[in-house]
Amino acid sequence: MKKKLLCAVLTVAMVSSMLAGCGSTNKTESTDTSKSTEAEGSSADNNTLTVWCWDPAFNMNAMEKAEAIYQKENPDFKLNIVETPWEDVQTKLTTAATSGQLDTLPDILLMQDNAFQKNVISYPDAFTDLTGSAVDYTQFAEGKTGFSTVDGKNYGVPFDNGAVIACYRTDILEQAGYSIDDFTDITFSDYLEKGKVVLEKTGKPLLSCIAGESDVIVMMLQSAGGSFFDESGKANIVNNDILKEVMTTYQKMVEAGVLVEVNDWDQYIATINNGTVASAVNGCWIMASVQGAQDQAGKWDITNMPRLDSAATATNYANQGGSSWAVTSNCKNVDLATDFLSKTFAGSTELYDQILETGAVATYLPAGDSDAYGKTNDFFSGKPVYSKIVEYAGKIPACGTGVYFYEARDAVATAITNIIGGSDINTELQTAEDTVNFTMGQ
Amino acid sequence: MTNKKNNSVTLKMRKRVRSAGRYTFLSIISLLSIFPLYYMACAATNMSVDVIRGKLIPGTYVIENFKNLLAAQNVASAMFNSFKYATICTLVSLVICSLAGYGFEIYHDKAKDTIFSVLLLAMMVPFAATMIPLFQMFSSANLLNTTMGFILPSISTPFLIMMFRQSARSFPHDLIEAARIDGVTEVGIFFKMFFPTMKSTYAAAMTITFMNAWNNYLWPKVIMMDDKSITMPMLIANLTSGYTTDYGSLMLGVFMCTIPTVIVFFVLQKSFANGITGAVKG
Amino acid sequence: MNGRKKKITLAKKHNLTGWAFLVPATLLIVVMSFLPMIKAFVLSLKTGIGVTMKWAGFLNYIRMFKDTVFMQALKNNFIYLIIQVPIMLILALILASMLNNKDLKFKGFFRTAIFLPCATSLVSYAIIFRSLFAVDGLVNTILIKFGFLHTGYNFLGHATSARIIIIIALIWRWTGYNMVFYLSGLQNIDYSVYEAAKIDGASPFQTFWKITAPLLKPTILLTTIMSTNGTLQLFDESVNLTNGGPANATITMSHYIYNTSFKYVPNFGYSAAMSYLILILVAVLAFVQMRVGDKRD
């Protein structure tokens, strides 16, 4: 009897000691980390800034170079760069802001341009308004700063360029009797007709893209300054003539076999590297992937993208991808952060010269005038590709993504899939608009 | 016996055919299951562009891939962290959940059965919904970037409790009664009798818990905000985040992330399925 | 008299010990799951963008039934549940009883091989499945070679075939996982039962249905509830294999909830409400399964 009582007591004691054990490790660890929390939430130390960004070869490398440049004048300055993939930046930001734990955010984070307005409007308390700061916004193209502007206030420092380029396999074009000039400053109907010839003579489609992602549609739409939303922010899909033209053009290209849809990013890159398609139209950052196939060196050339036929505002230029730096509200040293950014990403051509070799093309306009941008690239038929990209970037029409950009993009992707499957375009666009309106009506 | 000889020959034949069929079936299924590992191993030895082009023969690029991987990521630290988190999490949760599963079954009554059913509800809400309140708690308790922060939400799971509860059902009650008469304490029964006889359940639970902890992604990605605390799955996410992906080193990383769980399984499988004697003799 | 009194206190003591055994785990679940769940429920009664939320009562719960994408996702989840779970569990049961055979050679190899898929990192598994079923992938190449097809079929581009691929992928990935539970459950069955059945001349099929399956009932209940829960909360395959496409034909509820929380303009009230619908669905199914399967003989 007594033994059993003892036994029960022991059980409880054991269990509680185990919990206490956890508790005490927890205590030691938390004291241990309270130090590091300061280091990785925003930095308490006066000369250190914490940055969240991704891609060691691209964004992180740029930040490191910027740190080195700023250190020349401010030797005590230090960056604590934490590698955080974009998806995780978004998840962490959402979680921190929704749970009211803004003090877990870093000083600076990198944000996809497409998500910028959405995040600022959802979490106005999480960001620092940079209007009127040391950052000179006149040095950037309006098409770029527009992404990070909400209600006339600027919340971001533009970073990499997403100007759309069209890369062509000149050897394939030659087989069909064309040169790169035949694909420069053309319209989509030219593109379609010439694409049919290329397909017939070489068996290769011109273009590939990912089914269910409306990247190509967005590029086409934005090249004519179009948007999924009107100026008041209402969904503008059914009565959007530009979008309708985009959708029918896209449909025609797929039906003719000139545009081939694959299912994911890896296969998309494979169509380019394997030589299954004769061209790639995407943000200029695609060059790094194109150059992955070293055996195709010299066989590629770059020009501008085709434009829409009937839209009055049609141009041969658009934007795809790209990102900007945001300063969070958790930054204790806003002056240091803005001074750093204004003297590097918004003020140093030296920085942009240094990072050019990684494929990071500047949106900072003065950078385009430097000698480094005039250099030729042997992979792309010995052309000065970077100066071309900067030239294209300057001609991109400004267009708003809108807060509900991702919702609209997915709804239109659903629509185009169904249209290609044989559904009526007007019904599908109506459904897409209804879907977007549904999400907006909360 | 002798006049049944013919019969036994056909029986033997039938047996042989049956066993050949069994081996064929198992071999085909094993091949299908192993293919991705083979693919990973091949891809890890090839250049990125060859991986993309679908090359399925081992290459010679493994050293370069390894160098690139080490240059881009702190693999050693991620491996160490993953091991640390997964091992601690597995050990603690095995103790706590097996105690509970045993308690729910051996001492079952209406109240405990009801509580058990209520506990099951805890796993039925998608983690995305509870993540934000949980983050709030952990952030206020200063548990971000800690081992404690990683393991606490996954120590006690309805799934493990149920697994032990269900297997405790085959633990014979007369054994317990006999032990009680012999004066063994309740805790003693658990540790000296239940624990050794349920070795197979523990080994299986260990495999599964280790794997789940090792592959846990959504929670660490929210609470780990420090380069020093990242885990292998986070490292792999880092590798795929750029404009261009180096598929060669990615696949090498993925391969390194898969192997530990496979080894744990291989080592433990004999203990949870030796296939000979029933562990419990009634 | 005295003896009876002792018995009552003994029973009480056992009862108390039982409680002590389950308190740590229960407390942890209460703090780590129930508290956040209550907060999430409160959230589900609110609506709004980001941090600006206002009370909405049960509006979110009504709203989700008007949401065509969510209804499509609900339907997809049930298609997966009804088709995939039974196939997978039966296959796992068959494999486990085959691999429990003590005369079988290379048991360790076969078991590890079949377990491998669920240990495989999601990244490589997704890449492999997508490339296998690509228009110019291995599956199409084989089908064309044997004359079943003339040109490559875009498996992931059509609703039905994309769903079938998700189901195949799920079976491929989780059969070995469930096999582990059956294998360990089988250890608690006395092997002599099988020997006896063999002497009685029972066929393997009979042995399986008459002996193995009934004795494994507690484990089968466990795996059924876990698989039901896992399938209704399915996320990985929808996101990584098909990205929900084509045209939302394969999107799951959890995938949509993730989108409304982290990809789209965040509305956590609505996400929480949809999460609670999953809870209700799983709870009802699990309740029925417990009623049918959780009887102590």
Image (spheres, coloured by chain):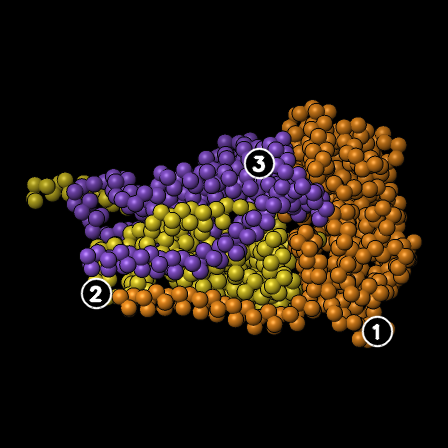
Colour chain C appears in = purple
Q: Nearer the viewer, residue C124 or A305?
A: C124
Can residue B239 be seen here? no
Image coords of residue A70 (percent x, y): 83, 69
Colour chain A appears in = orange
Mark 3 falls on what kind of element?
A: helix
Q: Which residue is mark 3?
A: C73
Mark 1 falls on what kind of element?
A: loop
Q: Label 1 sits on what residue type?
A: Asn
Q: Are marks 3 and 1 in contact (CB under 8 Å)?
A: no
Residue at image location 35% in from the left, 43% down from the top: C294
Q: Real-space Cα distance between discs 1 and 2?
A: 78 Å
Q: Which residue is mark 2?
A: B182
Q: Label 3 sits on what residue type?
A: Ala
Q: Nearer the viewer, residue A210 or C223?
A: C223
Q: Real-space Cα distance between discs 3 and 1?
A: 55 Å
Residue at image location 11% in from the left, 43% down from the top: B5
Image coords of residue C268 (percent x, y): 65, 45
| Left or right of residue A355, residue B272 in this image | left
Label 2 resides on the chain identified as B
The letter of the yellow chain is: B
Label 1 resides on the chain identified as A
